Amino acid sequence: MTDIHATIDGLVTSNDVVLFMKGTARMPMCGFSGTVVRILDHIGVEFADVNVLASEEIRQGIKDYSNWPTIPQLYVKGEFIGGCDIVREMFETGELKTVLAEKGVPLVV
C-alpha cells in the first residue's frame, strides 16, 4: 500500500461521511462539488471535506483508490457511494437518506 493510499484509507475509514471535492464545504470550487455539499447540508449530515486541489497526490490518489475518474467522490462508512450524478439521483429517490440510516449515520435535525 502506498503512503497516499494509506492516507486516503485512513480518511475514509475514520470518518462516517467523507467528500473528496474541489474546494471546501465552505467554498466549493466547482459546481459538481457544490451540488453534493448542498445535498448533504439539506439532508443534515455532518461530513469531512477533503480539498483535492490542495494536493495533486490526493487528487490523483483518490481516483486510483476508488477506480473512479472524477471528483467529487462521496464515501459513507468506508464505502464509495459515487460522484455528483449518482449522489443527486440517490437524493432525489430518497435512497441516500436510506443508505445513511442503514449505516447508522446520524442526521443533524
Image (cartoon, rainbow, N blue to C red):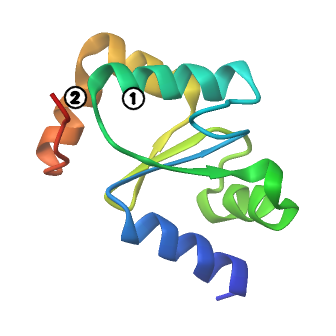
In which quarter of the view is residue 70 placed? Answer: top right
In the rendered image of this protein, does residue 61 appear above or below residue 52? below
Q: Position of residue 16 (x, y in %)?
A: 32, 57
Cβ–Cβ below 8 Å for labels 2 and 1?
Answer: no
Q: Which amino acid type corresponds to the residue marked 1 in the rendered image?
A: Leu
Viewport quadrant of the C terminus: top left
Residue position for label 2: 97
The crowd level at tag 2 (other Cα within 10 Å; few <14, some 14-19, many 20+) is some
- Residue nearest the observer in this picture, 48 or 57: 48
Give SS at disc 2.
Answer: helix
Q: Earlier in the sequence, mark 2 or mark 1?
A: 1
In which quarter of the view is residue 91 placed? Answer: top left
Q: Which residue: 27% across, 29% down?
A: 44
Q: Which residue: 61% across, 23% down?
A: 34
Is residue 19 rendered to the left or right of residue 53?
A: left
Instruction: Please give the label number shown on residue 40.
Output: 1
In the rendered image of this protein, does residue 78 appear above or below residue 27? below
Viewport quadrant of the N terminus: bottom right
User: Of all residues shown, which one is farthest toward the top?
Assistant: 92
Q: Position of residue 105 (x, y in %)?
A: 19, 48
Instruction: Please give the label number shown on residue 78.
Output: none
In the rendered image of this protein, does residue 65 appear above or below residue 81? below
Q: Which residue: 12% across, 44% down?
A: 102
Tell us which disc is closer to us: 2 or 1. Answer: 1
Q: Which residue: 34% across, 11% down?
A: 92
Q: Position of residue 108 (x, y in %)?
A: 20, 34
Number of numbered labels in the structure image: 2
- Residue nearest the observer in this picture, 42 or 26: 26
Give SS at disc 1.
Answer: helix
Q: How many angstroms separate mark 2 from mark 1 (CA)?
A: 10 Å
User: Of all residues shown, which one is farthest toward the right?
Assistant: 56
